[in-house]
Image (cartoon, helix red, strand yellow):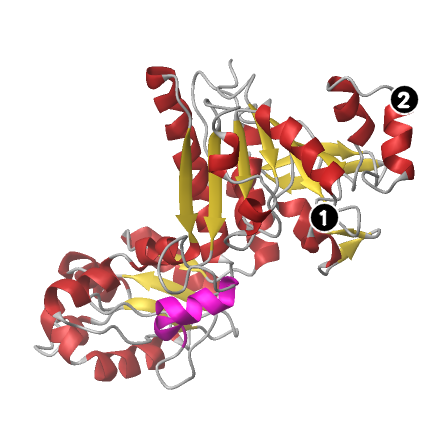
Amino acid sequence: MSAPCEGVRVVDLSRVLAGPQCAALLGDLGADVVKVESPHGGDETRSWLPFVDGVSTAFLSVNRNKRSIAVDLTTPEGRALVRELIVSADVVIENFRTGTMERWGLGYEDLRTDAPRLVYSAISAFGRTGELAERAGYEAVLQAFSGVMSITGDPDGPPARSGPSLLDLGTGILTAHAVTAALLDRERTGRGQRVDTALLGTAMTLLGYHAQGYLSAGEVPERRGSAHAALVPYRAYPCADDESVFIAAGNDGLWARFCDALGLERLRDDLRFSTLPARREHRQELDEQLVAVLSRLPRDELLDILEAAGVPAAPVNDVAQVVEHPQVRELDTIQTVFHPGLARAIELVASPFRATEMVTRVRRAPPMLGEHTDEILDEFGYDVEARTDLRARGIVT
């Protein structure tokens, strides 16, 4: 089986989540990813809790399949070295504040003459043009700005940040998609190009039908907790053992099965609840009656009843429960690799897709800071004396 990006070199200048996620996905596909980090602490996520034997688990999550070189980009010598790396590469990924790379002489226009086949991927918060282009932004800031936070949380509670970093990680995924498309286009045209992605653009994509509801119908969505605006019942319900079950009986056929399985024919035949439009109109009354019934049943008993009836439902698992679930293990999304810094094997969440003719594997553990500096410099012809000199002057570590 082939690795489709084998032979592709990626220089990853990004930090935190979005850019590193993109680079990790390209590494999963076989690319040689060189992660350039500051000698002064490296990627910010190296300092994020929790730690395992002094190594940040946040850093582990998005830096598999990479080699690390520590270079001080604040120095002219460091920038010259990184330029050398980039010009020889197929892809560069950066997420510095707008204008930073240009001030360093490492912008797309600065590089395209010497590297006409380079795919230059720039990730930003608000985009590279417009009145907010130079504004800094982070995951929660963009969740607030984009409206994502306004529709997350309980109806009677404040806006909430989503648990996963959807915009950072989603931007990483979409950027990997854009980069592979640009590489494919390069095969046709022989030319590289600049690829711009932004957390705000990702947010608009993920808003999906919520944004379209406003664009087409002028409807501003509201927070509904675990419920759905259009489908009823379609939410998490509490059970007798302090657990919860999400029930997706959103159409009339599933609603009838649900009622028959639980002996709720009186609700099935009630004109307030017999059709989906009626259930939407009388959502509160229906939910009150369902909570009264379902809260008397233990979670597993309720799940067995619904499974037998063919009604889609799932336990509301915590992270430990889902990571250890046999189905997750069956999908091979958690893979094991030896980590030299920890001197033992660790488990990592890997690329989620599988193909019959391509392989996507965790080949390298997330690197220690500057772990491969000498190895990478050696590939570019820097002998021991030159590497020693660079290290003595603090340009690399």
Q: Amino acid at mark 1?
A: Thr
Q: Which residue is mark 1?
A: 74
Report whether residue 148 is seen: no
Residue at left 31%, top 70%? 227
When asked about the image quadrant of residue 288, the answer is bottom left
In the rendered view, does 336 fall on the left or right side of 274?
right
Above or below, comparing residue 208 to residue 379 in the picture: below
Residue 5 in the image, given as x and y percentages of width and height = 51, 21
Q: How many marks?
A: 2
Mark 1 or mark 2, whichever is nearer to me: 1
In the rendered view, does 254 fall on the left or right side of 160?
left
Quadrant location, the C terminus:
top right
Q: CA distance from mark 1 to mark 2?
A: 23 Å
Of the two numbered discs 1 and 2 on the same chain, state the one appearing first in sequence: 1
When asked about the image quadrant of residue 301, the answer is bottom left
Above or below, comparing residue 303 to residue 107 in the picture: below
Residue at left 41%, top 38%? 195
Q: Which residues are magenta?
A: 137-153
Q: Main secondary structure of the magenta part?
A: helix
Label 1 packing within 10 angstroms: few (<14), some (14-19), many (20+): few
Residue 34 in the image, given as x and y percentages of width and height = 66, 31
Residue 123 in the image, given as x and y percentages of width and height = 48, 48
Tell which of 311 and 91 is nearer to you.
91
Residue at left 35%, top 81%? 155
Q: Amino acid at mark 2?
A: Val
Disc number at residue 384?
2
Above or below, comparing residue 175 to residue 99 in the picture: above
In the rendered view, does 75 fall on the left or right side of 322?
right
